[in-house]
């Protein structure tokens, strides 16, 4: 619910458990007052005056007067070039090179529902959702530039989304910085949490203590990146999984971004997230509009665990789309780690027969099926099936798989072009490049300039043609390089800085049209593993390949970290062969099964390598997975032990209605003669009893949460176990 208190000029944005409060200070500037646990509207008048006193004494000023020193005030959307010396939320330069603006409050409106963000991925609403929108309009009188601060309140989900819309005034404005959101905490949380790493080590959790100055994370690569995820959380030093403040902010965007926390001289924090200014600029003519990507804000007073569960619920229900949003995802076999480029009809059919026998439902033909692609160095762009490898094309393959009761999935990398391809020979100018400069090849490939409408349309048509050519039910969309030497022939001299964002808009355009055209297709996102695991992509792909690192032990950290804001069903986890292809490590099949079981399950190995015993256990495991797939799709995730703290990890999934749960425990490397303690569960009903399906014993909810489960650890490396319970 959104309420405006006329007398105190306060906006109160309320979700079920949280409040977000903005005050129009002296009727002119929207100030940030509060974000946190729900407070009653009536108490607000008192609350907001008190923390300002110290600063009022210092400035003794009225808004808009020369004495008004902005750096003492907590703004909702601070501008550049004034007496606020902290990082601005936006900066714009007019035709005369002037960068000073003074946008002041002009109007507000409160709408039922949420207008969509054209061309950009966003959290959406469905009929019956209790969602309201607040738009606060600011106007710079001199230039006529208008800025709309947009807030959407998702009451039931305890989520607020924010973005900013700029509308050009009289002359031309060149936007240089345009954050999606900015927020000043008067009392800053003490720490910042981020998800960082690199390829094969995605989304490891890093927690840093905030100090005076700026701490930031960013991507400049044209993809959201393996290195930093567009997510930050602010927490206190005593915030744990189950208690304490956690403020999570996630950007619904898949390109270069910047997220920063600036701690000022009073230890007030300014948090910002948005498109990375390093790769950004936008020319705004009279009446023209620029809309920033959306940021998703989640506060929890019950620790990081509840923050994650709030992200998970809204992402599952109101960010992911397509018919698979609400459907069980098929257990698939991907050919990559089994065959790499050495793939053909016979191999696929051989795998398929074995897969069918084990209960697998879909076979994905990964890289190597098109053009003359026998390695990394050719054919991207030529999306024609190689008939020598697949006689009869995908049509025949799909039909034969269908007869066996299996679906066909394919791999594509449509943003790319190999210099050795028909497409490149026809259109050497279609790749991202700057004439006269080197065209850096990365994995022997270049990127198509999707900021050009004709190129984006061509890619879209090729894909529609391909997906119409056979009964294909799954697409893995890969992206194996970053943007370099950026520029576009389609953009004039003054618009070259728009390239990065326009590239992403071109990609979103293709993805939107594909989603509309193929609503029943299961689209999976991949970028050299998890290089573009972000909410922007979740809007088009309800699942993402978390990492090219499929080692069970390494996956503990990757999946644990990813779960901080992304739901289990969106995180694909494949059981691969041992010794592991990336790390050479050997873990038991059971360990690898347990690692993948609480997530979106797949296989990525040569099934012929499984022993008869392993085939039997795989069959049993897949049928057990089907029984609990509802839990993976809709259950609440509790992280019980962090692999970032010790060699142990544990997590559990609890059904929404509390009737069922599954718990997994992992021990990594053994040291010898270690003590271990009971594994305490969370989120249960203390009064209820739960029967364990593994041993038939009945446990009290209070016992499970306070005394915990006994771990039957055998003292060896890479041990794991799992329990299922039903409430009695
Ligand atoms: C990178 C992906 O992450 C892998 O899973 C695989 O699809 C290869 N590309 C294929 O080239």
Image: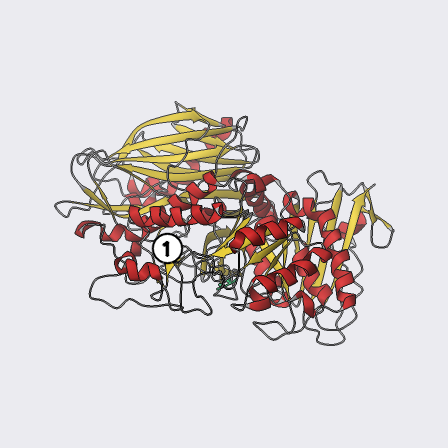
Q: Quarter-wise, where is residue 328 in the image?
A: top right
Residue 57 in picture, x, y percent from top left = 33, 41
Considering every residue shown, the one lying at the far left of the view is 96
- Examine the rendering and report whether any part of residue 560 can be seen: no
Q: How is the image coloured?
A: secondary structure
Q: Quadrant of the C terminus?
A: top right
Disc 1: CA contacts within 10 A as few (<14), some (14-19) or many (>=20): many
Query: Position of 448 compared to 686: left or right?
Result: left
Residue 258 in picture, x, y percent from top left = 37, 54
The residue at the point 39 percent across, 55 percent down is 415
Q: How many marks?
A: 1
Q: Secondary structure at mark 1?
A: loop
Is 5 above or below relative to 611? above
The residue at the point 34 percent across, 41 percent down is 77
Residue 197 in picture, x, y percent from top left = 49, 64
Residue 240 in picture, x, y percent from top left = 61, 53
Query: Position of 617 compared to 609: left or right?
Result: right
Is 73 above or below relative to 370? above
- Examine the rendering and report whether any part of residue 351 can be seen: yes
Is 480 above or below relative to 687? below
Query: Position of 516 compared to 615: left or right?
Result: left
Q: Quarter-wise, where is residue 434 in the image?
A: bottom left
The residue wearing badge 1 is 256
């Amino acid at each position: 619910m959104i309420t405006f208190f006329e007398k105190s000029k306060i906006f109160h944005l309320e979700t079920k458990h949280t409040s977000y409060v903005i005050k129009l200070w002296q009727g002119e500037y929207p100030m940030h007052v509060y974000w946190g646990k729900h407070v009653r509207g009536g108490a607000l008048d008192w609350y907001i005056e008190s923390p300002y006193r110290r600063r009022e004494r210092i400035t003794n000023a009225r808004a808009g007067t020369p004495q008004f020193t902005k750096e003492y005030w907590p703004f909702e959307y601070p501008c550049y070039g004034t007496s606020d010396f902290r990082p601005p939320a936006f900066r714009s330069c007019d035709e005369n090179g002037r960068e000073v603006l003074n946008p002041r409050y002009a109007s507000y409106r409160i709408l039922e529902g949420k207008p969509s963000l054209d061309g950009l991925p966003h959290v959406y609403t469905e009929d019956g959702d209790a969602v309201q929108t607040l738009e606060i309009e600011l106007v710079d009188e001199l230039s006529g530039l208008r800025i709309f601060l947009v807030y959407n309140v998702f009451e039931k989900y305890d989520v607020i989304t924010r973005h900013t819309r700029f509308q050009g005034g009289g002359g031309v404005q060149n936007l240089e910085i345009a954050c999606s959101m900015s927020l000043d905490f008067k009392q800053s949380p003490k720490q910042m949490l981020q998800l960082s790493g690199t390829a094969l080590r995605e989304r490891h959790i890093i927690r840093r203590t905030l100090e005076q100055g700026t701490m930031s994370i960013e991507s400049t690569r044209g993809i959201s990146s393996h290195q930093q995820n567009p997510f930050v959380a602010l927490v206190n030093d005593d915030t744990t999984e189950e208690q304490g403040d956690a403020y999570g902010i996630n950007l619904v965007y898949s390109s270069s971004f910047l997220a920063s926390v600036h701690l000022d001289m009073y230890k007030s924090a300014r948090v910002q997230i948005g498109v990375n200014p390093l790769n950004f600029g936008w020319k705004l003519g009279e009446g023209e509009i620029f809309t920033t990507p959306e940021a998703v804000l989640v506060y929890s007073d019950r620790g990081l665990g509840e923050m994650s569960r709030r992200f998970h619920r809204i992402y599952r229900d109101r960010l992911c789309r397509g018919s698979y949003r609400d459907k069980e995802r098929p257990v698939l076999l991907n050919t990559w780690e089994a065959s790499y480029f050495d793939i053909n009809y016979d191999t696929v059919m051989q795998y398929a027969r074995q897969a069918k026998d084990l209960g697998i439902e879909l076979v994905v033909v990964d890289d190597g099926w098109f053009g003359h692609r026998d390695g990394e160095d050719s054919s991207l762009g030529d999306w024609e099936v190689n008939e020598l490898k697949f006689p009869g094309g995908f049509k025949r393959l799909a039909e034969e798989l269908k007869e066996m009761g299996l679906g066909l999935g394919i791999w594509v990398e449509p943003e790319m072009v190999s210099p050795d391809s028909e497409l490149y020979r026809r259109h050497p100018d279609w790749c991202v490049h700057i004439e006269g400069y080197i065209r850096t090849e990365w994995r022997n490939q270049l990127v198509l300039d999707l900021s050009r409408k004709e190129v984006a349309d061509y890619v879209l048509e090729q894909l529609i043609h391909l997906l119409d050519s056979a009964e294909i039910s799954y697409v893995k969309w890969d992206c194996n390089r970053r943007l370099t030497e950026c520029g576009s022939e389609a953009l004039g001299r003054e618009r070259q800085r728009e390239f990065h964002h326009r590239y992403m808009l071109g990609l979103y355009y293709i993805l939107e049209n594909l989603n509309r055209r193929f609503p029943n297709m299961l689209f999976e996102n991949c970028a050299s593993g998890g290089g573009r695991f972000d909410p922007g992509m979740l809007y088009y792909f309800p699942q993402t390949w978390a990492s090219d690192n499929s080692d069970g032990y390494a996956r503990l950290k990757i999946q644990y970290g990813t779960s901080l804001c992304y739901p289990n069903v969106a995180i694909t986890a494949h059981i691969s062969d041992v010794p592991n292809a990336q790390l050479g490590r050997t873990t038991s099949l059971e360990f690898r099964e347990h690692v993948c079981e609480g997530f979106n399950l797949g296989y990525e190995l040569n099934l012929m390598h499984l022993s008869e015993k392993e085939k039997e256990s795989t069959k049993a495991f897949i049928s057990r997975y089907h029984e609990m797939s509802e839990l993976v799709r809709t259950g609440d995730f509790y992280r019980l032990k962090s692999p970032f703290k010790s060699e142990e990890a544990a997590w559990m999934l609890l059904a929404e209605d509390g009737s069922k749960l599954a718990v997994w425990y992992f021990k990594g490397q053994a040291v010898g003669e270690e003590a271990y303690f009971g594994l305490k569960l969370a989120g249960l009903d203390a009064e209820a009893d739960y029967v364990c399906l593994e041993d038939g014993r009945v446990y009290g909810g209070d016992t499970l949460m306070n005394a915990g489960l006994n771990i039957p650890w055998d003292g060896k490396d890479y041990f794991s176990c799992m329990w299922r319970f039903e409430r009695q």
